[in-house]
DNA sequence: GAATTGACCAGCT
DNA sequence: AAGCTGGCCAATT
């Protein structure tokens, strides 16, 4: 059974255009609860529609990859396939440019 | 209803 | 860089 919260998460998730990524935090903000990033992570982790929901387009706020059911490696290769550049640290940590994470999900009212 | 969990975040050591 | 802490939130036990 999907909760309302999860539905929101998945809905926004599907809205992410190919070649773009977002962060758990932005996603939470898109829902209207900027502090619920953890819950968002959980919702995605459950992932009832692995085929339909591009959960690989969600990364961490600091640009590092984050987790994935099928493994981080898989996630990275998916992202590459979508045309997203993956950079590497001196220590070999993979990360994404923050400029690509700027996908705006839910227009916050102009302040 | 309390306690635990987790694909997070920010800050500090 | 790596590790720990506390904070926050929804779902599950």
Image: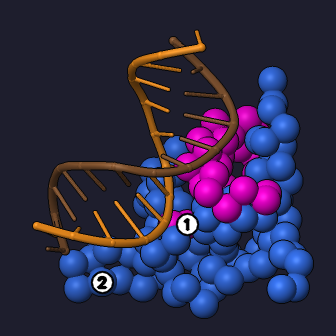
Chain colours: A blue, B orange, C brown
Q: In front: A4, or A60? A: A4
Q: From the viewer's perspective, is C7 left or right of A18?
A: left
- The percent position of residue A53, horizontal first and vertical second, equals 76, 51
Mark 1 nearby-residue class (10 Å; few <14, some 14–19, many ≥20) = many
Helix, strand or loop for disc 2? loop
Q: Earlier in the sequence, mark 2 or mark 1?
A: 1
The residue beneath circle 2 is A89
In which image quadrant can residue A12 be found?
A: bottom right
Q: Quadrant of the N terminus of chain A?
A: top right
> Percent from the top left, x then y, of residue A62?
46, 75
Along the horizontal axis of the image, is C2 left or right of A7? left
Q: Which residues are magenta?
A: A31-60
Q: Can the viewer see residue A41 in this picture? A: no
Residue at the spot x=47%, y=60% of the render? A66
Residue A39, label in figure: none
* Residue A4 drawn above or below residue A20: above
| Residue identifier under label 1 | A59
Marks 2 and 1: same chain? yes
Image vertical order of residue A16 relative to residue C4, above or below: below
The residue lying furthest to the bottom in this view is A99
Binning the other alpha carbons within 10 Å of mark 2 as few (below 14), some (14 to 19) or many (20 upward) gives few
């Amino acid at each position: 059974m999907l909760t309302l919260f999860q539905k929101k998460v998945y809905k926004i998730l599907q809205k992410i255009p190919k070649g773009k990524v977002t962060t758990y935090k932005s996603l939470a903000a898109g829902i209207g609860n900027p502090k619920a990033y953890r819950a968002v992570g959980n919702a995605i982790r459950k992932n009832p529609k692995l085929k339909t929901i591009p959960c690989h387009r969600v990364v961490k706020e600091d640009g590092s990859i984050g987790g994935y059911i099928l493994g981080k490696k898989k996630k990275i290769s998916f992202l590459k396939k979508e045309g997203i550049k993956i950079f590497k640290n001196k220590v070999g940590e993979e990360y994404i440019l923050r400029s690509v994470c700027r996908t705006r999900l839910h227009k916050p009212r102009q302040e």
